[in-house]
Amino acid sequence: MNNTQKIKKRKLIENFKDIEYLNSGNARQRLAYSEIKKLNIFEKLKKYNPILTGTIPIGIDLPESDLDIICECQNHSEFRAYLLAQFSDKKDFKVYSIKQDGIDSTIAAFKTDHFLFEIFGQNIPTEKQNAYRHMIIENRILKEKGSKFKQSIIELKSNGIKTEPAFAKLLGLDGNPYAALLKLE
């Protein structure tokens, strides 16, 4: 791999907007890439600016970790109808709306042979949604702290602690771990 290819690969991993980085990742990332491609999920969601977020892209997932895809939707009724049209034939499909931190959110969930998918829409650009922001911050911290820190995060998660609280615990952050992590942006 030449320097240009290395820089290009690093940029893909840094912004996470192009899932090609998964194809050269660990076994679970490659499987995620294969499932996403097989179902044409990003092509189907293209107009909603999808980004895969969560623990799988940054390699701190557990065997039961799901694939979280965030989307920007201006109209929740339209988004809900579109999700129904595209994915309602999938196993255990459901779509529902909630308020998360006071923000209207529409979520579709379904299963494949290997993953639970959750497609999450808010009327916020995907790069500004908390799921993406958390992942970028966590990825940076993982790179700064190294493999021992990463393993400690995975161990805490294996013991039932969610991702953001695990980071907050190891970093000694007080208060709401989700808000505390965002302060590290």
Image (cartoon, helix red, strand yellow):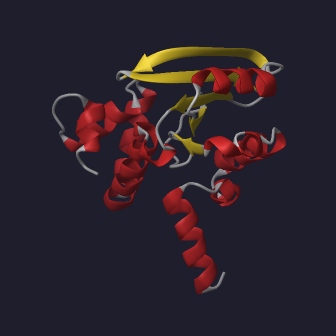
Q: Is residue 117 left or right of residue 171?
A: right
Give the image quarter of residue 67: top right
- Closer to the camera in the image, 126 or 38: 126
In this view, 47 is above or below 179: below
Give the image quarter of residue 92: top right
Query: Can see residue 65?
Result: no
Q: Is residue 50 left or right of residue 101?
A: right
- Residue 176 location, x and y as percent? 23, 28
- Closer to the camera in the image, 162 or 149: 162
- Residue 150 location, x and y as percent? 40, 48
Look at 66% across and 81% down and name the residue there.
Answer: 1
In this view, 57 is above or below 104: below
- Residue 114 location, x and y as percent? 74, 31
Look at 74% across and 42% down and name the residue there.
Answer: 36
Numbered circles on residues, count: 0
Give the image quarter of residue 66: top right
Query: Can see residue 150?
Result: yes
Look at 55% across and 33% down and name the residue there.
Answer: 74
- Residue 48 location, x and y as percent? 63, 41
Q: Is residue 123 left or right of residue 114?
A: left
Look at 45% across and 38% down and name the residue there.
Answer: 131
- Closer to the camera in the image, 49 or 42: 49
